[in-house]
Amino acid sequence: MAAESLPRDLGEIRRAQRVQVSLQDQVARLYEETREDVYRYLLTLGLHPPQAQEAAQEVFLRLYVTLRKGEKIERPRGWIFRVAHNLGLKTRAKQDAHPPFDPDLEGRLAGKELDPEEGLIDQERMRRFHRAVEALSPQQKRCLFLRLEGLRYPEIGAALGISASTAGEFLRRAIARLRKASHA
């Protein structure tokens, strides 16, 4: 009797191993596709780069654990950003003793200058744009960033804990303010 159950048990073990490998591949693919977007989003929440890197990794670890438990995730990208948002806010609350990280600093340090005149014009244009973005409400900034990452209104709403129509209204107002600032 024990000999009869052995092949069945081995078959079940092999099936479970295939599912686990498939699950690892799925999470690895999502990691490759969205890790930079998640990292940049965490920076916009004010996390310092090391904390943003750690939080981004934690998001994908949570994704793997959730999927391994057998939970079904309808929109993985929206789920990832919702978890990143919540984790980012918690992490930022712990680091509030330090000033928030300026995500544009990394780009300014890594960016190369054009000729001096073009550089000054570009810097002024970027300053106006950043002032306009900074004038947006935190919710408008988050909705705008998530929309730029390709999320749809329902996914943005789910990530931020608001309705899709509210996300759409935040986006409409943000875009109107940015347009007004760019024409000034």
Image (cartoon, rainbow, N blue to C red):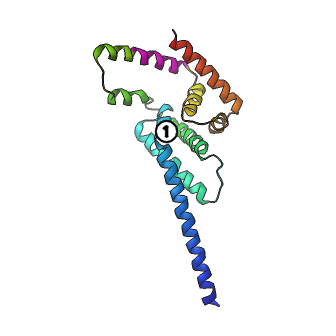
Q: Main secondary structure of the magenta part?
A: helix
Residue 182, image x, y percentages: 51, 14
- The image shows residue 88 at horizontal and vertical percentages of 52, 39
Pinpoint residue 170: horizontal percent, then vertical percent: 64, 25
Quarter residue 174 falls in: top right
**Residue segment shown in magenta:** 124-135
Q: Nearer the viewer, residue 54 or 9?
A: 9
Q: Is residue 25 left or right of residue 48?
A: right
Query: Residue at (28%, 17%) from the top-left corner?
Result: 115
In the picture provided, is 177 more to the left or to the right than 110?
right
Give the percent coordinates (x, y) of residue 184: 51, 8
Instruction: Based on the picture, tell me whether residue 52 belongs to the magenta stretch.
Output: no
Point 66% across, 27% down: residue: 168
Instruction: Quickly name the residue at label 1.
Output: 37
Work out which quarter of the rendered image holds the N terminus and state it. bottom right
Residue 102 appearing in the image: no
Q: Splitting the image into 4 quarters, where does residue 51 fall? A: top left
Depth order, front residue of 18/70: 18
Residue occupying the far top of the picture? 184
Residue 8 to residue 160: above or below = below
On whether residue 130 falls in the magenta region, the answer is yes
Q: Is residue 183 visible?
A: yes
Q: Secondary structure at mark 1?
A: helix
Q: How many marks?
A: 1
Q: Residue at x 60, y 17 (%)?
A: 176
Task: Tell me the amino acid under the disc marked 1.
Answer: Asp
Relative to 101, 75 lies left or right: right
